[in-house]
Image: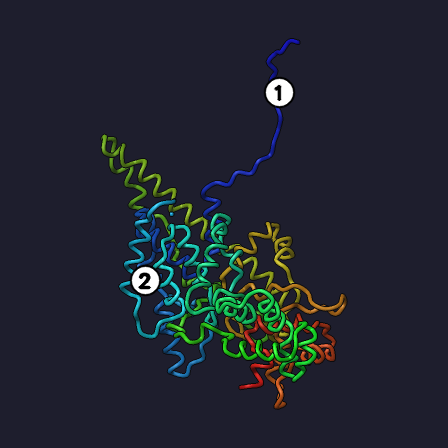
Amino acid sequence: MEFSPNLSLSQKQQLKLSPQLLQSFELMALPLTELQARIKAEIESNPALDLPSSWDVSYERFAQEKQRRETSGLDDTYSDSSSYGSDRGSGYDYEASDRQQKFMENALSLEETLQEHLLSQLGCEHLTEEAYKVGEILITNLDANGFFREDPKTILSEKQAEHLPDLLKLIRQFDPPGICAKDWRESLILQAQAKGLSGEDLKHFKALVEDNLELMRANKQAQVAKTLGIDTEELEELFAFLKTLTPFPGQSFSSGPEQYVIPDLSIKNEEGQLVLSMNNSSLPDLAINTEFESLAEDLGSSEESKKAQPYIKEQIKSANALIFQVQVRNQTLYKVAHILLQEQQEFFLFGPQYIKPLTQKAVAEQLGVHETTISRIATAKYIDTDWGIIPIKKLFSNAVGEEGSELSKQAVKETIRQILEEHQGQKALSDQKISDILKEKGISVARRTVAKYRNELNIDPSFIRGTN
């Protein structure tokens, strides 16, 4: 058999993302305050960038202005955009050792927040820099109760997510027990495990917490005991043990200084017309420094100038890239906001109960971009409305209910909130009762779904509300 060399040509499509495009995606996902910090850092390091001397990237002025409005009785709203704010490998890890020393020296403080308390414990662990960063992200993602604001998987990169199981296990061993949970139910189960509950006892405890607390409050112990497959005496012991735990472990800590959210844009009802305004005053009008740009020519053709020219060109290129990326971010945000104004008109005019089903995919199709682009531009961005400053993502919601009478998830949640706020009876409404009331309003939602939405609204279950 003879072999002969053979060449063949074939066409193959392959998408390659340039560093500039990747950075553009990154800037889209940044909240306004972090974008301000990124621009400030670039200005400090790149002499090719020029900006107005009056611009201040810090948002302390926004906080001060907000406080001034509140103390003077002025309405804290904005009529146009100009009135917005100013505004690590294996082996011994020396960086971890430095962190440990730093945290040990600052471990004691007055009015310690939950995040400070947990970070001080994290700093005492020998972790690689990458693992520490993941732990830091998890801790700063916790709310005042000790629960996750966002699903950790959605805020970690693929590489960071590799550390998630180990860091979750580690932080859940910190004080207080029960933190790093999705809700109070999971928190109670984590606390039970921390106190040594295991085997069949833990199995029965989980079933009690997840599905049977409403029945316990209704004094249906016999029914619960039968469901769990234990006698009433064992059930009472489990319930007594549950009462020694706290459903909200983070609330014993200071809430920390008040945090101010700077909205990226505004959509408000002005004399019957919805007006969309971008918050342009919180970002500077970046430009290329003309003196720096002409510096390469002014230096002449000396040996030193030849060495300086590549640096000058690189800084100008970097500055132009940042200016372009900020423009793309703002243009994309404006286009998305314009579609939201059209699709969610009833919400902007009449309130949260009128949020319609709207997916990111549907908006992406209207703009002719990928769904991930909409996800990035909606992440950690806020919009000022007549109903308060809300996350843009709140205006995206899946449909709930039967076809033909579908409501958005957000609208159902707001209806549940309204039902609970308007309830005047002495006995707290159970999730099943809320489900029944919704059905009377033509909204078919199961009890478990009601419980899920109520948890997302940070509203206590009836057995806790009934004791207040």
Q: Position of residue 454 (x, y in %)?
A: 60, 74
In which quadrant of the rendered view does residue 14 lie?
top right
Q: Answer whether labels 2 and 1 touch (C-beta < 8 Å).
A: no
Q: Label 1 belongs to which residue? A: 8
Residue occupying image coordinates x 56% and y 56%: 375
Q: Nearer the viewer, residue 217 or 41?
A: 217
Residue occupying image coordinates x 48% and y 59%: 168
- Relative to 423, say whether 391 is above or below: above
Q: Of the two numbered discs 2 and 1 on the same chain, state the one appearing first in sequence.
A: 1
Query: Residue flagged by tag 2: what amino acid is it?
Result: Ser
Query: Residue flagged by tag 1: what amino acid is it?
Result: Ser
Q: Position of residue 124 (x, y in %)?
A: 34, 59
Residue occupying image coordinates x 29% and y 46%: 291
Q: Nearer the viewer, residue 141 or 313?
A: 141
Q: Position of residue 20 (x, y in %)?
A: 45, 44
Q: Label 2 belongs to which residue? A: 54
Residue occupying image coordinates x 73% and y 77%: 439
Q: Position of residue 443 (x, y in %)?
A: 72, 74
